[in-house]
Amino acid sequence: MPEALPTRHIFVTGGVVSSLGKGIAAASIGRLLVERGFDVTIQKFDPYINVDPGTMSPFQHGEVYVTDDGAETDLDLGHYERFIGVSLSQSNNVTTGRIYQNILTKERRGDFLGSTVQVIPHVTDEIKAHLRRLAPSHDIVITEIGGTVGDIESLPFLEALRQFRQDMGKENTLFVHLTLIPYLAAAGELKTKPTQHSVRELRETGIQPDILICRTERKLTEEIRRKIARFCNVRVEHVIESLDVETIYEVPLRYREQHLDDHILELLGLTAPEPDLTDWSAMVDRIKRPGHGTVRIAVVGKYTALVDAYKSIQEALGHGGIANDVGVEIDWISSEEVEARGLEMLQAYGGVVIPGGFGVRGTEGMVDAVRYLREQGIPFLGICLGLQCAIIEFARNVCGLEDSDSHEFDRETSDPVISLMDAQYNVTEMGGTMRLGSYPCRLEENSVAREAYGAAEVSERHRHRYEVNNEYRQLLAQGGMRFSGLSPDGGLVEIIELPDHPFFIATQFHPELRSRPTASHPLFTSFVKAAAERSPLDGQENDRPRREHEAEASEQAVGAAR
């Protein structure tokens, strides 16, 4: 460990507009500090009043990321894990809802001895307690504050951070503020005024940022840097330029070029060896210049109008490309679009992923897609709902159970090949019947899954309610389906595959949640390899009207949310 305690704290805030990339900024800073030998963890404070994102619409919030301990968290925790290479937990994601839930529990229990419960000190003290919780076991804790400075929901968090700096001392705390420098084409220049106003608003809460990270379309001139530094009260060298890059994994390299990590260590009074980013740079180079062409992958899902709903799948497919030294070009296709346009459209792809989801909408399109992929020999990877659709399709079209379905989709089906476990039927609270977090899975010898993993037992993260109905397993096996991954007691199906297919695997768990850019998940590595062997692009232009599809995405998302 380069430095002894006390633990240092870095706070990442954002201004001007949302979606500037605070999560990537926090994760990139974490990567640089990890490379310098520090034990780093990252947490997210979200200002919404939901206890967690588990019951929120994917169209509003994007994917729900699940940790090993079963926490349903913000998708930024996926970025944190992928960048710093550490598994996080429930403690790494805190919402306003959880803060208030804890406070009200204490109040009902009598912990406040009859005092009036107020934002200051009770809410701010609860926030500070969460800040301290991770400190004892880490050198540096990075905390990202969700939302934008000026949002009323963020004020208690900012006040808690102001107090925390007083408690811990300026030498142990550092504020990084992410802001926007827009380029106005009509004026032909970059405008610094939004950044000035954002910093002024932050300073009105009692917080002076130490470092500014400026998202911009054009390079910042020395004159603009000096102007920003002068009006925002920071040193010129602490104005960091953040241009768009080809891949998010390039961001730490661009920060390093500007010595961001050096500035952070100087401000925190730390010393450490120079980072060795050789392997990381090689990984980025592979993404930007793959040696064996590009493969087209289709993701056929329910929430494809908002790609963030499948953020971890998007990243895991890219990781599979890195492992195989191929580029991966993804088309996001609504399962309802497949029904309307015809299954033949899937012939254009090297492979197809059918991901998770809840509810009946679009599932018949997924079932039809699975049948087409099975019959045409197109590589298929099913995840969670994708596995359940594969079971339904196989039962209907191979085993002759024409009425087979999931109890989630049809309560009256005579053949519920997918159903709740007996212990789940009397649970009524939303989320209460979910299987969440990491569970072990034993792999059958000589199976495709066992060969991919190179291990007899693995642990994978789950987020689902319904399971394969064990009453139908024998019939499905007689039809040729192999249950290559089971729970240790053999009671739950975890992986299915078809031995005579080029690549046909589906999992009840979410393998994408364990994939890393430097360590691709074995199933994604194998799937991308099979897809590339079937149909590599070799750098050719994709002929699907992808830009037209993306232009319609926003309108589709709004309609689906309604």
Image (cartoon, grey):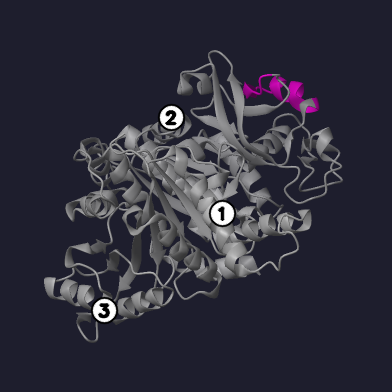
Relative to 484, is 325 above or below? below
| Residue 534 within the magenta-colored segment of the rendering | no
Percent coordinates x, y for residue 433 in the rendering: 75, 42
Q: Is residue 341 visible?
A: no
Nearer the viewer's eye, disc 3 or disc 1? 1
Q: Which residue is mark 3?
A: 192
Looking at the rendering, which quadrant does residue 11 occupy?
bottom left
Q: Secondary structure at mark 3?
A: loop
Nearer the viewer's eye, disc 3 or disc 2? 3
Label 2 near label 3: C-beta < 8 Å? Answer: no
| Residue 485 within the magenta-colored segment of the rendering | yes
Q: Secondary structure at mark 2?
A: helix
Q: Which residue is mark 2?
A: 526
Q: Residue at x 14, y 71 (%)?
A: 221
Question: Hey, which residue is sitting farthest top in the picture?
Answer: 445
Disc 3 from disc 1: Cα separation: 32 Å
In this picture, which residue range is highlighted in magenta?
Answer: 471-488
